[in-house]
Image (spheres, rainbow, N blue to C red):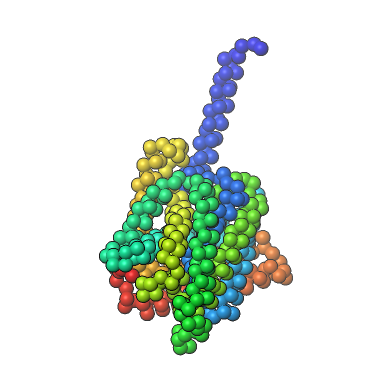
Amino acid sequence: MGALRPSSIANEGNDAQIHEDAHHDDQKDLDAGALFVLKSKGSWVHSGYHLTTSIVAPPLLSLPYAFAFLGWAGGILCLVIGGLVTFYSYNLISLVLEHHAQLGHRHLRFRDMAHDILGPRWGRYYVGPIQFMVCYGAVVASTLLGGQCMKAIYLLTNPDGTMKLYEFVIIFGCFMLILAQIPSFHSLRHINLVSLVLCLAYSACATGGSISIGSSSKGPEKDYSLEGNTEDRIFGVFNAIAIIATTYGNGIIPEIQATLAPPVKGKMFKGLCVCYTVATVTFFSVAISGYWAFGNQAEGLILTNFLVDGKALVPKWFILMTNIFTILQLSAVGVVYLQPTNEVLESTLADPRKTEFSARNTIPRLIARSLSVVIATTIAAMLPFFGDINAVIGAFGFMPLDFILPVVFFNLTFKPSKQSPIFWLNVTIAVVFSTLGVIAGIAAVRQISLDAQNYRLFANV
């Protein structure tokens, strides 16, 4: 081989420069939030872990309480319909995402979908803010529930203890502060595998504890009648529907699908099958066993029923273990729902032309994520009645994102014939759940007004 001529060396140098410039242009097109937080490296198994953590979470321990407003037939029917509609809706949104990816325009975020399908204003002023409210609300709720579980453990081991709820919320927030620094959504895959095991563990404990108490003479007398006057019962039904909708809620399907390595076709369906297998086992076992054991006395969190006047109806170590499982999974749930916030922060503050772990990107990430967790922890400590507010978020947030928008996106993207069953099924779902969302929102606001007299900042509830 002859020596390379200067002109050929120059040409090679120019080619390398052109390639490098193109790479930088790609990075400019792909903002830092997508580049660093929503890394597309995962498999369908990983999507199953992420989906399970985002859906099968401790709010499922409120299902017996929802049954107390609905009764046996209504409770099981709503649980079945909620499962079928969300599984269907999540598949539709996945198909829409796959379709756009095949056309060469892969959507990585919910607001990107809304921007392209509904128009820029919908993405910026409606879907984006609602998703942020839902996800950040889930972070606050997880932090508060984590603090409540910690307080339950404390009182179990030290009944005369003087520590207040907000102190435990702050302790849990400090734990979240560490986990929040995990760089990308994909980096959470192993934590979310552990989370999947934990949700099976505490659901099994809740089910086993309910059956044990219900089979003994320790529990309350079983009464499955619906309490209250007609008005209370009607609003109770819609409140229960909001609880079930929130339990099945996700709100981050596009962001989870964004973590999949291309090609993504068919991968989310497999992930959803993993998730809904776990959801079916846990949701129905906890809801049915809890309502069977405690009837209309079921508390907002079924674990509360395991204690009566400070006396444990099951062995203390059992309650301790169940609460520990719940606390550990809550930390994973909180970190998963922080991802859309992290993505927005990275898009705003990070420089995609610098490496992910450069000082230019690491320092703003550390400060911004820490502030995000500190604010969520402060809200949770100040507003320990956040469960009531969460019902409003469920009605006005999870209902549109998970029940209404997926069917609208599908009809606008694929334009099925108006004579086809799928078109009218989607229209029916959109209309029915829009109506339910508005009524459930009114019921949730009414509940807040009824409970307002008990509200105090930093209350030790």
Residue under the point 71% across and 70% down? 421
Is residue 429 placed above or below 69 in the rendered structure? above
Residue 319 figure quarter: bottom left
Q: Nearer the viewer, residue 347 or 169?
A: 169
Q: Nearer the viewer, residue 15 or 259?
A: 259
Q: How many marks?
A: 0
Measured as percent of width and height from the top left, residue 449 is found at 37, 78
Measured as percent of width and height from the top left, residue 20 is found at 53, 31
Residue under the point 39% across and 41% down? 362
- Residue pushed farthest bottom? 229
Is residue 13 placed above or below 350 in the rendered structure? above
Residue under the point 56% across and 69% down? 285
Image quadrant in which the N terminus is located:
top right
- Residue pushed farthest right? 419
- Residue pushed farthest top? 2
Residue 166 figure quarter: bottom left
Is residue 447 placed above or below 12 in the rendered structure? below
Tell me: 100 left or right of 155: right
Q: Is residue 340 visible?
A: no
Tell me: 135 left or right of 408: left
Tell me: 210 left or right of 362: right
Q: Nearer the viewer, residue 445 or 373?
A: 373
Residue under the point 36% across and 70% down? 385
Image quadrant in which the C terminus is located:
bottom left
Q: Is residue 179 visible?
A: yes
Measured as percent of width and height from the top left, residue 326 is found at 45, 60
